[in-house]
Amino acid sequence: MHRSLHAFRSAYKMPYRTAQIRLVSSHPEVYEPCDDSFALVDALLADRTNLLEHQPSICMEIGCGSGYIITSLVLILGQEVPGVYYIATDINPHAVKVTQETLNAHGVLAELVCMDIASGLEKRLAGKVDVMVVNPPYVPTPEDEVSRGGIATAWAGGENGRSVIDRILPVAERLLSDRGWLYMVTLTANDPKEICLLMRKKGYASRIIVQRSTEEESLQIIKFWCDSDIQDLNEATSSPRKAAASFVGSLVSQFPRIPFGKSQ
Amino acid sequence: MRLLTHNMLSSNIKGVTNGFPLGIEVEKVIEKQVDFNPDFLRNMFAKVEWKALVDAARTMGYAELPEEADLSMLESDDFLKRFHHALLELHLEEGALVCPETGRKFPVNKGIPNMLLLEDEV
């Protein structure tokens, strides 16, 4: 937390552009903003110029928890991208209420729905989301903790922390528009390299926006976007090996600390 | 919940083939003014199912939308203002959304729909 840009901004009274911790509501069953939340918001700040240029019309968060991230996104885009439709979901009924309170405390609006991932939005919102932010439950846990409910849904990620991430990715891919961007938090134990490979097969390029190591964990915030060159490459059957080789090369340079192969 | 959100929601109960649009049971509607943004409305027009919006707005007590709409209407300020009001300013604060096939009700409390499914509905 002390290293985050957010804390830095607060300490030096820099312009107020993200959610303020003192205005974030809480509940015993709702995950409070932590290093992972700050890292994601820092990634959005770092990419702010691109976001403003992107002019998204529909922005979505899956798993909004305390509301710190969606509120920050609304504030970051602010008046410079007017008339955005913000919608956030969480499987925890307490979390959507807390998010509502956090949004209200900052005087901003977003629509909230209590649901599992995006069940109930997948049909009509397909291909419409221009920016999606996800801080998934990424902590490796025994598989049965994933469905335990309550605050555990905020962090319990099952084997390699991938159970919920692997359910979210196809949904994200379905909901994102042709020009859609996805920002997602991953832990090194989630094998982000493999996540990027999976997404690449679906035509998405990826880049690490923020990489942060805390005492407890090593986090990456990855941005995914649809890349027509990759789609063309995926379709071209002429030289798949060459394409794969050059891609692995670029990944290795992106993940310097991740051992090649299965990272466990 | 705004009607834009209602327009994006479907019933996702196992076995339901056409869960859209959800019916609306109104207990309390509130209005919140938001900035009028014609570009946003023109952008959203293509994404909205018009008939579902007209019916939902009527259920919420606003009957000022034309039954049918086409792109030429987006030039009219009067039309855009009605569209704006129905889409963005009417909120279902308390009530329920109703699956059109099964009649299953999804409660809406403090403006937030609860679309969680029971184990036997997934």
Image (tube, coloured by chain):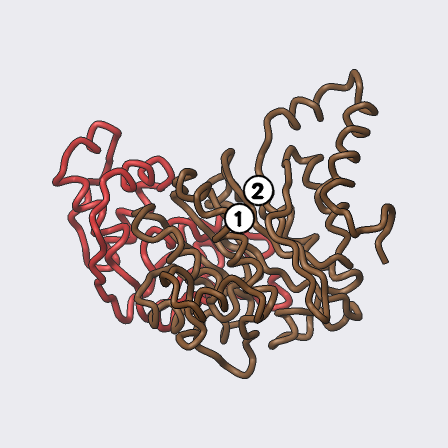
Chain colours: A brown, B red
Task: Give above or below for B69 relative to B20.
Answer: above
Chain where mark 2 sits: A
Element assignment for label 1: loop
User: So how many labels did they put on this image?
Assistant: 2
Q: Residue at x 35, y 48 (%)?
A: A84
Across and down, in percent, residue A136 comes to 62, 60
For mark 1, does the 10 Å Cα neighbourhood hold few (<14), some (14 to 19), or many (20 or more) residues?
some
Residue A122: numbered disc: 1
Cβ atoms at labels 2 and 1 below 8 Å apart = yes
Compared across the picture, whether A251 is left or right of A41 comes to right
Compared across the picture, whether B103 is left or right of B81 comes to right
**Which residue bears the numbered disc 2?**
A174
What residue occupies the far front of the structure in this picture? A12
Across and down, in percent, residue B91 comes to 28, 62
Q: Residue at x 37, y 58 (%)?
A: A75
Mark 2–mark 1 distance (CA, rounded to whole Å): 7 Å
Across and down, in percent, residue B73 comes to 19, 32
What residue occupies the far left of the structure in this picture? B78
The amino acid marked with disc number 2 is Arg
The amino acid marked with disc number 1 is Glu
Q: Residue at x 42, y 67 (%)?
A: A12
For mark 2, does the 10 Å Cα neighbourhood hold few (<14), some (14 to 19), or many (20 or more) residues?
some
Nearer the observer, A117 or B40: B40
Across and down, in percent, residue A183 comes to 57, 50
